[in-house]
Image (spheres, grey):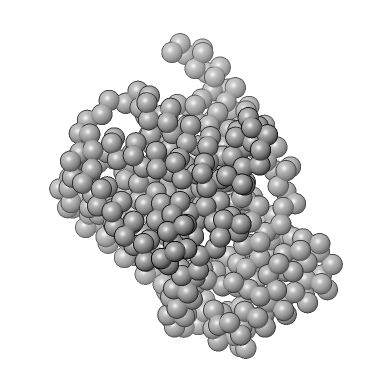
Amino acid sequence: MPRTLRLTLTLLGALAAIYALVVTWRKNERAAGLDFYIYFVASQLPARADVDNIYAPEVQERVGEEYYERALRSGSELRIYDAKRRRRLDNVSSPFLYTTFRWVSRNYERALTQDHVLLLAAFVAGVLLLARRVGVSWAAALFLLAALLLWYRGFEADLRVGNVNSLQLFACAAMLWAPPLAAGAILGALLAFKPNLLAVALLLAFARIATREFHRLRIEIAGGAIGGAFAFVAASINFHSPRVWLQWIAAANQFWHRIPTRLERNVTPALALFEKHGTAPSYAIAFVLFAIACAAIWRGRRADDPLVVGIGILIYLLSAPVVWLHYMVLVVPVAIALLRWRVTGAIALLALAMIAEVPFERLTQVPAANVEAMLIAPALFALYVCAIVRLSQRDPAAA
């Protein structure tokens, strides 16, 4: 491509991304924070002598009502709105996740703005870092970023509820750029932050064994131990006792066995199976998908960390009993990794468009909420198949 044309396209991509940023901010600047409200409250509880276990049902009832009264006295419409929806807290996240939110303002509206800025910055940086990691041009990366900001319902959901999937996206991107020790530390801390990426760690370890990178594996394990230990100690100090981790495990186990319905926007592909048989099939699905991924890695015998990370994420999204729409932010890494090849790149873009929902609504004039599971499930499966096929090839030629 001529240099002038490349620069022109890059400039146009930058302008498109800036426009998308402005539109996204204006649209969501005053969005409420259904999930962020829990982080906001939970991050303030360690200093309280009357709270021994933030995960206890009694504490969640009592503190939820107390902070609802505080919201009423604050006069903030946003705080009252979120507090009313969370009159009973739903503390199921890890102690380390709550610890990382200690820095936000005690003024709720200011804290919510801080969170919006953080999520937006993390998503932008994550997408660009991932794109450049796999060799996508700046122009293509910027146009993709603009499209995701404007039309990708998964990111919009993450921003509007104030969840942490964009932070996980950025952490995955940073991990893929980092040297082995730092990459391991990031992943170790990330698992303590939210353990839904466990399959990523296991697949990366298997990939190192398959490619006989034992020295690198040892360094990454050491880094993982450092990152995990840091998270464990930081949360233990914050909550004044390591016992908080045991309390969290009990609460997380109860959450895992909840099965929200489609009406509650649970988009997990195998929901009908879970509703009939409970959460047991989740383990079987994850095992099968993991075994297929290991076979592909063993056959390909090459290092392709972006694909491995993306497949690890997909294993969770395809097997978990609860998958919210904002979890679709985590589809972005594998989709970007597949852009390196023409056929899989086209499929990846189509899958993103299906998950995005906005293109479907504009084409059909039908609300996507009624059929979103039927859009998301085949898209996730197509991405998984494409990633497995490419990972199993020893030296696929990139487009």
Residue 223, x across and y down, in percent:
31, 59
Residue drawn at 57 percent across, 44 percent down: 371
Q: Answer whether residue 316 is visible to the viewer in this image.
A: no
Residue drawn at 47 percent across, 57 percent down: 271
Give the quarter of the image for residue 231. Answer: bottom left
Residue 235, x across and y down, in percent:
48, 73
- Residue in the foreground of this view, choosing between 85 and 332: 85
- Residue in the foreground of this view, choosing between 50 and 375: 375
Residue 208, x across and y down, in percent:
21, 50
- On screen, residue 87 above or below 59: above
Residue 24, x across and y down, in percent:
67, 41
- Residue in the foreground of this view, choosing between 7 and 196: 196
Q: Is residue 43 left or right of residue 32?
A: left
- Residue in the foreground of this view, choosing between 141 and 82: 82
Q: Residue furthest left?
A: 212
Q: Is residue 96 left or right of residue 364?
A: left
- Count all numbered tags in the image, as a single digit: 0
For the N terminus, which image quadrant?
Answer: top left
Give the quarter of the image for residue 226. Answer: bottom left
- On screen, residue 96 above or below 198: below
